[in-house]
Amino acid sequence: MGRSPCCSKVGLQKGPWSSKEDTLLKNYIQQHGEGQWRSLPHKAALNDFADVYVRKGLLRCGKSCRLRWMNYLRPGIKRGNITPEEEDIITRLHSLLGNRWSLIAGRLPGRTDNEIKNHWNTCMLKKLKNSGIQPKIHKLSMKCLKEKTKSIVPETSITRNFTKKKINDDGNAKNIESNETKTLHIPKPIRVSSTFSRSNSLDSVLSAASSSDDSGVDEQKLNLLSLFELDRANYGGLDQVWEEDQDFLSTYDYPVHYSDSSSTAEMLEKMYDEYLQLL
DNA sequence: AATAATCTCAACCGCTCAATA
DNA sequence: ATATTGAGCGGTTGAGATTAT
């Protein structure tokens, strides 16, 4: 028995949204919150709005409502040109994650997966090709992803001794085992959007990462924190991430620019340190 | 000024996966 | 254990805007 369609599609509106439809959707979500997209159009019809048109409800399928909200109406959406800094982040993340637009978008506050995907396909891909660079897309298969996350699925937290880097007199870094034991709380490694939906990713990351009061933590740290947690959630551990990031990058044709010219592993390590400081 | 070509991006579609009955 | 459902994701489309001829 196959799956029933998300809506009958009979008598439903398609194409661009009108401002009235936007208003109706916003009003409904403000009152009832996100979710239950499938039943939203019907429920919205029951709202006590004066306008006759509004009384008819949203003539849109739930899927369409969700998309409109996530990509356009949601508060905090940053519209307009994507900055060079954001492009840099996108390039770096794409080199690691491939076309995982929702993951990439999760690390650029205010940007949507659709917007990033469009920008990549229309602008960035062209730029890369014009400079003679042929991007290879790294696709992390679900099998691979499951394998990576399998080991931490039952856990909600881990306790471990942390390895710290000590800089010797000769300038070389040396790993030292810290006596300090810390517990990190790991988000449930399920579909990213469920745990890290773009509307609440920072909040959920914070609550998952620490029960302490984080009200004073600035946005940059929050982003680092979410980046770190996402990597944990999706790859099942930093050690693996660091090793495999190097593998990913070595199979990539186009140059990945880092502001401090450090490797991805070092970048993640920095974030890891910041994460510990936050705790 | 008119037309064609190209670009942008909002929206749709089909699929997967986790949750649930 | 299996079927069904709901949510979310990435690929693709196409209408409107912009630029070139």
Image (cartoon, coloured by chain):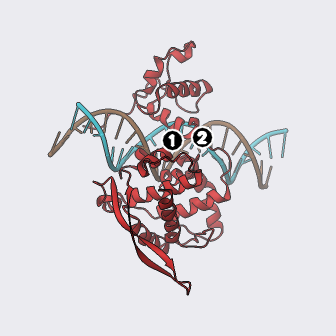
Chain colours: A red, B cyan, C brown
Q: Residue A76 bears which disc, if any?
A: 2
Secondary element under disc 2, as helix, strand or loop, is loop
- Can you give x and y, in whole percent of width and height, for residue A3 in the image? 30, 37
Q: Is residue A2 above or below residue C12?
A: above
Q: Where residue A199 is drawn, which disc sits there?
A: 1
**Considering only vertical position in the picture, is A277 above or below B10?**
below
Task: Residue A140: name its quadrant.
Answer: bottom left
Using the image as rendered, state which of residue A17 and residue A50 is in the foreground: A50
**Marks 1 and 2: same chain?**
yes
**Closer-to-camera residue (A151/A203):** A203
The residue lying toward the viewer, choosing from A134 and A170, is A170
* Chain name for mark 2: A
Q: Residue A38 falls in which quadrant of the image? A: top left
Mark 1 is on which residue type? Ser
Residue A180, given in percent of the width and then of the height, sits at 39, 67
The disc numbered 1 marks a residue on which chain?
A
Name the residue at 60% across, 73% down: A261
> Label 1 crowding class (10 Å Cα cut-off): few <14, some 14-19, many 20+?
some
What is the x, y in percent for residue A31? 50, 25
Give the class, few, some or many, for how many residues have Cα within 10 Å of label 2's Cα (few <14, many ≥20): few
Count of labels in the image: 2
Marks 1 and 2: CB-CB under 8 Å?
Answer: yes
Which residue corresponds to the image point at 62% horizontal and 54% vertical from the top-left?
A122
User: Which amino acid does the dot numbered 2 rest on?
Assistant: Gly
N-terminal label among 1 and 2: 2
Judged from the image, the secondary structure of the residue bearing numbered disc 1 is loop
Residue displayed at 56% across by 37% down: A74
Tell me how far mark 1 sits from mark 2, CA to CA: 8 Å
